[in-house]
Image (tube, rainbow, N blue to C red):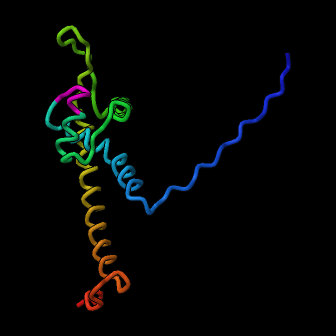
Amino acid sequence: MNKSLTPLRSVPRPAPDLTDRGYWVGTIKMSLSKFFVLRVLLDGSSHGYDIARAVERVTAGCCSPTAGGLYPVLKELESGGYVTGEAEVVSGRERRVYTLTDKGQQAFRTGAAAWADITSALQETGQIACCAPKACANPDRSKTP
């Protein structure tokens, strides 16, 4: 039985709508998920559900990781040596408890410094965009002193 195989062709993805705030919010949240998991684990070891709630708390509800988003991040962090995970039985149920390693602490510090730089650049860019002659209601604001 020799069936000829049709080569698979990739289906082009539609271009994202960069004018959609939801696109940017989703992109930013995806980028920050590892950062905030590391941040939460700075406070101590925790299991997945508590990590998700703590991320939601430290971000004032901005980021609310789902199990489908959180566990792949935890697996990646564990395989990279940034966290360790150990099985623990509580009330007859097994759960995995994650602990930040020294490498994870260093990754958080590095990430915090990088985000501080980016935040500063974004604030500066926002001020420029806000005060561009076409965007400004008061054209005098567009002039720098």
Check residue 49 for magenta coloring.
Answer: yes
The quarter holding residue 97 reads: top left
The image position of residue 111, as x and y in percent, is: 28, 50
Which is more toward the observer, 140 or 102? 140
Residue pushed farthest top? 92
Q: Is residue 60 above or below residue 119?
A: above
Task: Determine the residue positioned at 21% across, 12% down.
Answer: 89
Q: Is residue 44 above or below residue 135?
A: above
Say left or right for 54 vs 110.
left
The quarter holding residue 117 reads: bottom left
Say left or right for 18 vs 56.
right
Task: Determine the residue positioned at 85% across, 15% down.
Answer: 1
Rendered-image quadrant of the C terminus: bottom left
The image position of residue 27, as x and y in percent, is: 39, 51
The image position of residue 58, as x and y in percent, is: 17, 44
Task: Determine the residue positioned at 28% across, 31% down.
Answer: 83
Task: Determine the residue positioned at 46% across, 61% down.
Answer: 18
Residue pushed farthest right? 2
Looking at the rendering, the stretch of residues picked out in magenta corresponds to: 45-51
The image position of residue 44, as x and y in percent, is: 15, 32
Q: Is residue 115 above or below residue 56?
A: below
